[in-house]
Image (cartoon, coloured by chain):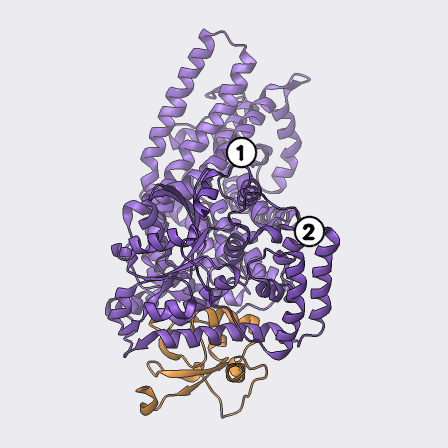
Amino acid sequence: MDSMARALPVVKSAPTGGLGSLRLGDIPLRQEVELVSIDLPLELAEPLLERGLLPGCRICPVRISPSGDPIVSIDGSLLALRRETADCLCVRILSHLQDAD
Amino acid sequence: MASLALDSCGSCAQHRTQSLVRLGLSPDKWDYLVALAGNPNVGKSTVFNELTGLRQHTGNWPGKTVVRAEGAFGHEGQRVKVVDLPGTYSLQAGSEDEEVARDFVLFGRPDVTVVVVDATRLERNLNLVLQILEITDRVVVYLNLMDEARRHGIAVDPGKLEKELGVPVVPGTAREGIGIPELLAAAHDVALGKRDTKPFRLAQHAPDVEHAIERLVPVVEEVFPEVPNSRWVALRLLNADEAVQEAVTSGELGQLGRHDSVTEMDPPPEYARQKVLDAATRLRWELPPDFHDLVTEHVYSAAETIANAAQKRGLAKAGFAFDRKLDDLLTSRIFGFPLMLMILAVVFWLTIEGANVPSAMLATLLIDNGHTWLKGIAAAMSIPWWLDGFLLDGVYLATAWVISVMLPPMAIFFPLFTLLEDFGYLPRVAFNLDSMFKKAGAHGKQALTMCMGFGCNAAGVVATRVIDSPRERLIAIITNNFSLCNGRWPTQILIATIFIGALAPSQLGGLVSAAAVVGIALLGIVMMFVSSWLLSRTVLRGEATSFSLELPPYRPPRILQTLYTSLIDRTMIVLWRAVVFAIPAGAVIWLVSNITVGGVSLAQHAVSWLDPFGLLLGMNGVILLAYVVAIPANEIVIPTVLMLTVLTSGGDGGAGAGVMFELDSVAATGDLLRAGGWTLLTAVSLMLFSLLHNPCSTTIYTIYKETRSARWTTVATMLPVVLGVVVCFLVAQVWRLLAA
């Protein structure tokens, strides 16, 4: 049951919005961040989860496409996202201490 | 004992064989059946090749292995059959690939399922492993890419993973053959029941879900006592999974646990089966609305726990310097588009230029020599003129035309395209073009199916399977015909050379006609975007789904393997279908030109009847009739037009009524057409109509096979014709207004 409680924030049904939540779309290139939650209904979030975008994972934007969509590095592989999708990924910046694991 | 039962049983496997045939497997004899599953890009096809020795088409981006491959080999005196399932991230049956894989693991009842896992991305790969373990307990996990994991500073403990998952875990590096013998041994033991497995099963769900499962499981077990995992069945039924419900209704579910039984048992009575469905429906009402989300999250958190237990990560170094440099260029804001156009232009140039010589050789062989030779034999055997004409001038010539015009460009285009795919460039193209498709309400991967359509629309339609969302896939299918296919390029080039290139000074003629053809192709792309946009605003309304695409690392393409497999996979299949459809076309062409009513052939009747309508569209009756009879294959439009022109204008130089031909020189063709009353307007209208008309019957048939819907097949067929008629009509009216 403990793990259930922890797993629940994987997908947030309501956007928290406001200044407090940082989105992947706002992160500059080469800044590694940690995924906190995916602000999308599950059927849209599922393909992302399957491709490794799991809460707690490290994401690093590495490139911007000709039309402004990001490519992120995750788990050592490259994933192309749409800007709208990146704006639905809530992230937090890792401090150096946490980074060292 | 299990192996004996398998070996000696002839009749028991009948039911199973039936379901395997339904799943598309050829029903040969084997001792045990291995299914190969795994995420995309984990080297699954490499494992397949290592096992079977067949140089199998390997996939390096999602959904590439759309055609399931199968192979066979011998191991310790047993005949082993291996089926390569499409690479999928899960078995939720959300996309076509997932459905194929899931149905096979469930209903194909493989004796062992080998799941290939990428050791560098353990957590996300485990998601699929856990889902498969829910369905079957006969699983072996092959931990591939151990070398890459070491390079990335990731240590995976196979022993620990084996303990967590409860099934054999074999580490290795498939590319170098490491771990393959061990994998074979483990698969062998599991398949023959020599090694017991205790698969990890998801334990506790949320209380509400758990409660519903606990009440449904006894019902399932009572009706289907042999089912391998009644908890999973219960969960799927609560989820209203259509395939599982169907398996309950048909009674097929009862056979799933019986791997080596001697006799198939009768399905449980109908009222019992209905009882299971009713219980599931009743319990479903008591579940929380976010039930599906809860279950999904449960799988992910289990995968995370297991992955963390089995691996240690150092500092992961992401990406390779070379890949980054290349991506800097290929997906750059400045160079991305020009490089893409350049690469595609080179592919087309190689295709058109390279195909000329073999096309001419085939034409000489099949038409000049082959046809003459066959006619000689027919004459020697004194076959009646009508039979000889029907078979040789009609059926044979049409087929010969299709083969000689279609085979060489396809044999060049498809391997080139596959090389780009193997190298890893095509996902980047999809990525570059995604924003334009997004604006049209379509999917970024439609860029790939569009490019494929330039080779062959039927192949492009099949390729749309890589698009997960049904709405966006339909858009891609319906609009694929706007890609000017191989069969239409020669028409465009010939007409542009005769009528448009001739307007320019001779040294510029080639350039001007090439520009005209490229203009038509670009117009096709514009039309594709416009109609995608229109469709997604009207009948196929919906939001563009989120787009995420894995960009695989660049890998050196395997040239020989690509040549072999793209010839088998794409070229021959498409060519075969085209030939099948060309045969009746040839017959019809010959018949309409030789059957006379009131002293005039049917063709002439049709031409004079179509003439006024053709004139409205800037063309003439000959062209329209040629397009009607050439529905089976666009390649025969020009030969048919020439034949009909001679037939109706009474000029000489033809090869006889109903005998298709082409003239050796472009100038002679031009003279013939001008004598038939062709003008610049006729040429422009023909070029437009060649772009905007119904797909060939091969493509229409493929669309029907892919959509399984007569309605969408009709839409995909009629939309381009209607557009073509409107565009040609407007152009002709404006043209005549200006000329007057």
Q: Nearer the viewer, residue B173 or B58?
A: B173
Mark 2 residue type: Pro
For the C terminus of chain B, give its image quadrant: top right
Residue B734 seen: no
Could you tell me residue B219's position as x and y percent?
68, 63
Q: Nearer the viewer, residue B330 or A9?
A: A9
Q: Residue at x 38, y 84 (%)?
A: A33
Q: Nearer the viewer, residue B690 or B383?
A: B383
Q: Is residue B502 above or below residue B592?
A: below
Residue that label 2 marks: B268
Task: Using the image, tell me which numbered label, if any, was put on residue B581.
Answer: 1
Residue B478 seen: yes
Could you tell me residue B218's position as x and y percent?
66, 65
Name of the residue lying farthest toward the right: B271
* Chain shown in orange: A
Could you tell me residue B552's position as x and y percent?
35, 63
* Chain shown in purple: B
